[in-house]
Image (cartoon, grey):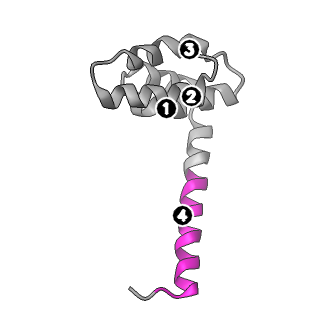
Amino acid sequence: MNWTVGGAAVVALLLAGGWLVDRWIWRARPREKLLAMLESGNWRYYKAAILELRRRGEDVSVHAPRIQALLASGSRVERAAGAAIARACFPGLK
């Protein structure tokens, strides 16, 4: 595929625009929706929801047991996700 500078610039702008829209959507979500995501059991939402709640000044330490449960999971993928979430959201969690 032959890329031009203009084509690469368009792709970069689209990616940056998508990232900005995603950030705006997370910031616009009500607190109740973020808490529902954490209570859903779908760990794929945990990191973003916890980081957004922390950005809003909330105490996120109450959500640490969810991450600890992931770290003790029988699933290798869930343990890896739990470790990544713990590093990003709870740097003091041991």
Of labels 1 and 4, the one closer to you: 1
> Which residue lies under the disc numbered 3?
94
Mark 2–mark 1 CB contact (< 8 Å): yes
Q: Nearer the viewer, residue 12 or 83?
A: 83
CA distance for labels 4 and 3: 36 Å
Quadrant position of residue 71: top left
8 vs 78: above or below = below
Magenta residues span 3-21
Q: Nearer the viewer, residue 61 or 25?
A: 61
> Which residue lies under the disc numbered 4?
15
86 vs 26: above or below = above
Tell me which label, 4 or 3, sits earlier in the chain: 4
Which of the image's four quarters has the N terminus?
Answer: bottom left
Tell me which label, 3 or 2, sits earlier in the chain: 2
Q: Which mark is residue 84?
A: 1
Which of the image's four quarters has the C terminus?
Answer: top right
Q: Residue lying furthest front in this view?
A: 94
Place of residue 25 in the rendered image (x, y in percent of width and height, measured from the top left):
56, 44
Q: Secondary structure at mark 3?
A: loop
Place of residue 75 in the rendered image (x, y in percent of width and height, measured from the top left):
28, 25
Quadrant position of residue 72: top left
Q: Secondary structure at mark 4?
A: helix
